[in-house]
């Protein structure tokens, strides 16, 4: 095969190495101590703002876009945060736990503490696709001006 300077027409180019910013997104997401931090959102964000933060965070750590070895785990972490913050009742209870300092990373509560309920890779992909499609169907921009 030998080294080629560029891919031949019709052949895919070699996969790019993970960009430092993308690697940082995975590390930041996995190190997040709250669902809000996992989405890079403020605690007083509206549901629409949270949705934009969720979509932006999802794209940054999406395993198809981010070649970091832990991208799938980060993608699942973002989906777990959205599962709580995107549901009004779960978010209200989660916020109450945060105010009391009662959210623990090893919580068995259905809010799942900071780690959130277990979300499979399939569930994470489905949640992302649904949220993206529902925003587009409503006429909104996918990630809001970015």
Image (cartoon, rainbow, N blue to C red):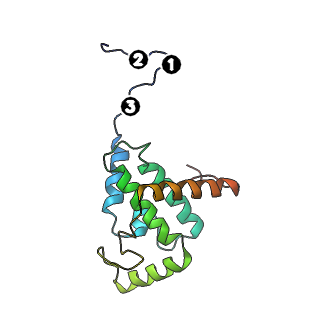
Frontmost residue, 125 versus 13: 125
| Residue 23 position (above or below residue 80) | above
Picture residue at 62% right of the left edge, 54% below the top: 133
Label 1 near label 2: C-beta < 8 Å?
Answer: no
| Residue 104 position (above or below residue 68) | below
**Tag 2, which secondary structure?**
loop
**Tag 1, which secondary structure?**
loop
Residue 116 seen anywhere in this rendered image of the structure = yes
Q: Quadrant of residue 52?
A: bottom right
| Residue 14 position (above or below residue 54) | above
Task: State which quarter of the image contains the N terminus.
Answer: top left
Q: Nearer the viewer, mark 2 or mark 1?
A: 1
Q: Is 137 placed left or right of 11 in the picture?
A: right
Neighbour class for label 3 at 10 Å: few (<14), some, many (≥20)? few
Q: Is 121 placed left or right of 3 in the picture?
A: right
Q: Quadrant of residue 36?
A: bottom left
Picture residue at 43% right of the left edge, 60% below the top: 78
- Please provide percent x and percent y for residue 16: 37, 32
Q: Please give the label number shown on residue 6.
A: 2
| Residue 54 position (above or below residue 103) | above
- Please provide percent x and percent y for residue 112: 38, 74
- Please provide percent x and percent y for residue 93: 47, 82
Label 1 near label 3: C-beta < 8 Å?
Answer: no
- Residue position for label 1: 10
Q: CA distance from mark 3 to mark 2?
A: 12 Å
Q: Please give the label number shown on residue 15.
A: 3
Label 2 near label 3: C-beta < 8 Å?
Answer: no
Neighbour class for label 1 at 10 Å: few (<14), some, many (≥20)? few
Neighbour class for label 2 at 10 Å: few (<14), some, many (≥20)? few
């Amino acid at each position: 095969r030998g080294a080629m300077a560029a891919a031949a027409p019709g052949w895919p180019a070699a996969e790019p190495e993970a960009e430092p910013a993308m690697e940082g997104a995975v590390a930041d997401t996995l190190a997040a101590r709250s669902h809000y931090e996992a989405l890079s959102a403020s605690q007083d964000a509206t549901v629409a703002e949270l949705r934009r933060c969720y979509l932006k965070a999802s794209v940054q750590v999406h395993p198809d876009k981010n070649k970091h070895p832990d991208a799938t785990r980060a993608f699942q972490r973002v989906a777990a945060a959205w599962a709580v913050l995107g549901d009004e009742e779960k978010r209200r209870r989660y916020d109450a736990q945060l105010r009391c300092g009662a959210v623990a990373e090893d919580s068995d509560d259905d809010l799942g503490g900071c780690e959130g309920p277990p979300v499979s890779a399939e569930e994470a992909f489905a949640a992302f696709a649904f949220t993206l499609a529902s925003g587009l169907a409503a006429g909104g921009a996918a990630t809001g001006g970015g």
